[in-house]
Image: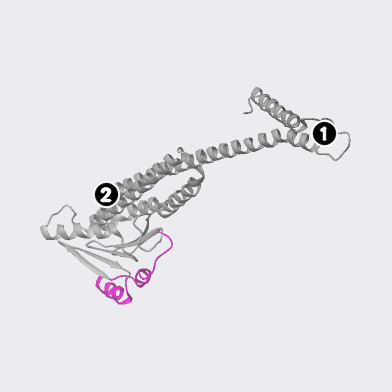
Amino acid sequence: MLFRYTHKKITWIDLESPTQDEVRKLMKEFAIHPLVANELLSPTVRPKVDIYPNYLYLILHFPVIEHRHNGRAEQEVDFILGKNFIITTHYETIDPLHEFSKIFEVNSIIDKSHIGVHAGFVFFHLLKELYRALGAELDHINTILERVEASVFDGHEREMVEAISRVNRDIVNFRQAIRLHGDVLASFENVSAKIYGDDFVYYIQAAIGEYQKIASALDGHRETISELHKTNDSLLTTKQNETMKTFTIMAFVTLPISFIAALFGMNVKDTPISGSAGDFWVIVGMMMATLLLMFAYFKHKKWM
């Protein structure tokens, strides 16, 4: 599906799940190299920057957690950046691009000029919108972390083992998706002056700053989930140790009682006390006395 937006002399083409016919038309209109056109037809594994005579080709992956449309943990956006045109390609609905298209259309209608005089500024504002969306995703993770933390200290350590693992998986996927953004944007900064001039470097540095904010917040979440994992494991281990301690004490306390019961249960003629008046209550009294002595001993040793 192809959407075309214009603002003054700038053209933005947004492709969602492009067909071969749509890509072929763009090849002719914007002189796109066949290798680039072929890459637009399917997702690419790694981010990159390629330099061509009249345009730059970038691939970036953006993690998504809360607003998934197809269940995948990341969304790819391909950028073809010329002097007066920008082509974005993606393979599912990406909410930040949809929101930016509304802004772009409004600016086109009322003829505001803050978008800039060339397509590089469109790319810059697109990146800001995409990173803003990543910030919202990190806020979502932070909300989950707060819930997990509350549950951990409310005594739900066992239930939180799976919850912590899920959050940790999301953080790992998030980090994996954006880990090369810094390198790609740095490479783009080095070559962007070729098309957009030296003054545009400032905007790319600002975009890198937006990425670094996301990376820094992500590192904070990684440290938080790591500490929560350790704390939860510690509390869970403590509970398990207390349970094992209780079972051990019970087993140790009942051992002498079991011994007394087995001793007087022996099938012999001369068992003391057995057969005399009140023998049952005497034996039960011996068991209770032994039990109380064992508990008193454990209390004295502060084992209970």
Task: State the count of labels.
Answer: 2
View extreme (right): residue? 269
View extreme (bottom): residue? 21
Q: Label 2 sits on what residue type? A: Tyr
Residue at 28% from the left image edge and 74% from the top image edge? 22
Is residue 49 highlighted in magenta?
no
Residue ID for mark 1: 275
Observer able to see residue 49 = no
In the rendered view, does 12 fall on the left or right side of 234?
left
Q: Quadrant of the N terminus?
A: bottom left
Give the quadrant of residue 2: bottom left
Give residue 203's mark.
2
Q: In the depicted view, which residue is nearer to us: 78 or 96?
A: 96
- The residues tagged by marks 1 and 2 sit, at their Cα atoms, a distance apart of 101 Å
View extreme (top): residue? 300
Dot 1: what SS? loop
Q: Label 1 sits on what residue type? A: Gly
CA neighbours of label 2 inside 10 A, class few (<14), some (14 to 19), many (20+): some
Give residue 42's mark.
none
Give the quadrant of residue 251: top right
Residue at 51% from the left image edge and 40% from the top image edge? 232
Q: Which residues are magenta?
A: 18-47
